[in-house]
Image: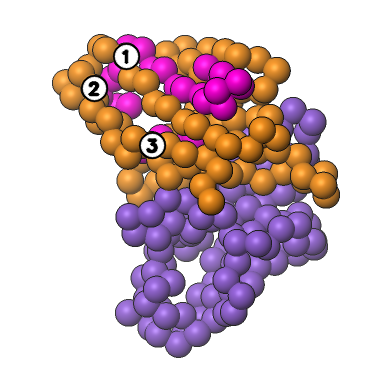
Amino acid sequence: DQQVKQNSPSLSVQEGRISILNCDYTNSMFDYFLWYKKYPAEGPTFLISISSIKDKNEDGRFTVFLNKSAKHLSLHIVPSQPGDSAVYFCAASARNAGNNRKLIWGLGTSLAVNP
Amino acid sequence: NAGVMQNPRHLVRRRGQEARLRCSPMKGHSHVYWYRQLPEEGLKFMVYLQKENIIDESGMPKERFSAEFPKEGPSILRIQQVVRGDSAAYFCASSPPLSYSGNTIYFGEGSWLTVV
């Protein structure tokens, strides 16, 4: 049961244009969402996060939008640069009965930004 | 301000040997997580530890795999009697103590295990 879904395994965008990566979730208890970027042979790097009390968070070229009613979030990268080419993972967490948190991960979307 | 440190970066083991992967969390972080990425697959959660305490090991295979995070020293992921299917990238992550608003975890560079 995939609670966090990234339905597009890959995305190709022209340099300078906007990249939009999507993520859907099923668990309404999720209240914290994160995006990570991963280059081959490296560990994932934290990009940006958003709490469920917000619907938008912006950091430079990266903006995350959260639509709680649709259980959907998206990462916008504008303008896209060739160095943004990587695999992007969406993750979500909820506080459990033991007062702990565990991140639930999507399978990733591979972004290619073409010069 | 060192990040999460993992070693070795690359490890080759013959079938039946033991593999030990080490992880030192970021300074000030008391929580450690281990993930595995098999070839052509996404990140799979394995185990979540605090010092001297396993919080969640729901992603750990039932046999041959164990993890610890002692009071002193790094966290260790131990794989006994390795098989070819254990060949993967193993990522460690750490985070500060739990906060109400949620945890951001920070990853190390990974340890690549190859079983021959």
Amino acid type shown at disc 2: Val
Magenta range is: A65-90
Task: Write down the residue under mark 2.
Answer: A13
Relative image position of residue A55 (x, y in whole percent): 60, 14
3 vs 1, front mark: 3
Residue A56 lies in quadrant: top right
User: The residue under label 3 is which amino acid type?
Assistant: Asn
Precedes in sequence: disc 3 or disc 2: 3
Crowd tier of the residue under label 1, counting other residues whose Cα lies within 10 Å: few below 14, some 14–19, many 20 or above: some
| Image-quadrant location for residue B52 | bottom right
Name the quadrant of the C terminus of chain A. Answer: top left
Separation of disc 2 and disc 1 at Cα? 7 Å
Magenta segment includes B34:
no
Task: Determine the residue positioned at 45% across, 22% down.
Answer: A75
Q: Which mark is residue A92?
A: none
The one nearer the camera, B20 or A70, is A70
Residue drawn at (47%, 39%) of the image: A5
Asked if the residue at tag 1 contacts the one at tag 2, i.e. Cβ–Cβ closer than 8 Å, the answer is: yes
Residue B24 percent location from the top left of the image: 62, 54
- Position above or below: B111 against A73: below
Does the magenta-highlighted stretch encompass residue A74?
A: yes
Looking at the rendered structure, whether the residues under marks 2 and 1 are on a common chain is answered as: yes
**Which residue lies under the disc numbered 3?**
A7
Mark 3 vs mark 2: give the one in front.
3
Residue under pointer 1: A18
The disc, 2 or 1, on the residue closer to the chain's N-terminal end is 2
